[in-house]
Amino acid sequence: MTGSMMSEKQVNTRSAPRPGGRAARIQAAVYAAVARLRAEKGEESLSVHAIAQEADVNPTTIYRRWGSLSQLLSDIALQKLLPDSEPEDTGNMHEDFSRWLEEYVDELATETGRKLLSEIAAAESDEYRVRCQQRHYEQIEAIRQRAIQRGERPPETMQVMDELIAPIVYRILFSQTLPDFAWASALLVKLLRI
């Protein structure tokens, strides 16, 4: 993804594998340790060694799995930002997009959402940015496919990404004022040409 936008054909829509067993326990312990350290001591307390000690794992386990503190924080941010559930099916394309958009803006257009997006953007590798884009792609594509099955004419998925998601993310990351649902809804109306 470096330096260019992905085309629809370039986006891999497979979900990232979900760890199970020991890997899941380690992930849960490390995520919980990060949350506790942030709550009790603040961001400045976060280091691989402090997290490992709090999670009762070896620091090499964190380095082996995530590579760096930045990658770990990006992974946590990605998990918090991306819902696993399918978008609601209301029977109407505009309403499906509208409800999905409202949830999206409610989650991301906050100081917490801004911080989480910043952590993903700051990741050392493209993996987290690509996974974030893939999940957005999957959610939008699910809405599109339902609309097509109902005989509606939805915009292309990458058009939704470029004309709806990109301006929202830009405002979240770079504007002093976070976007609200009314502003995002105006983008949706323009996109769907209603």
Image (cartoon, rainbow, N blue to C red):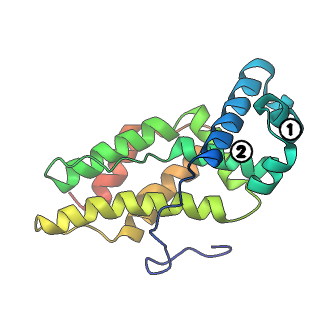
**Hey, what amino acid is under mark 1?**
Ser
Residue wearing tag 2 = 73
Residue 127: percent from left, percent from top: 65, 64
**Hey, what amino acid is under mark 2?**
Leu
Residue wearing tag 1 = 47
Vertical placement of residue 55 versus 146, above or below = above
Residue sitting at x 29%, y 68%: 155
Q: Residues within 10 Å of mark 2 (few under 14, many from 20)?
A: many
Left or right: residue 11 versus residue 71 is left
* Label 1–label 2 contact, CB within 8 A: no
User: Looking at the image, how many numbered discs can be counted on the residues?
Assistant: 2
Viewer-proximal residue, 145 or 113?
145
Residue sitting at x 44%, y 45%: 83
Residue 163: percent from left, percent from top: 42, 62
In space, the residues marked 1 and 2 are separated at their CA atoms by 10 Å
Left or right: residue 194 versus residue 5 is left
Quadrant for the C terminus in the image: bottom left
Residue at disc 1, secondary structure: loop
Vertical placement of residue 169 versus 192, above or below = above
Q: Is residue 167 visible?
A: yes
Viewer-proximal residue, 181 or 176?
181
Q: Is residue 67 visible?
A: no
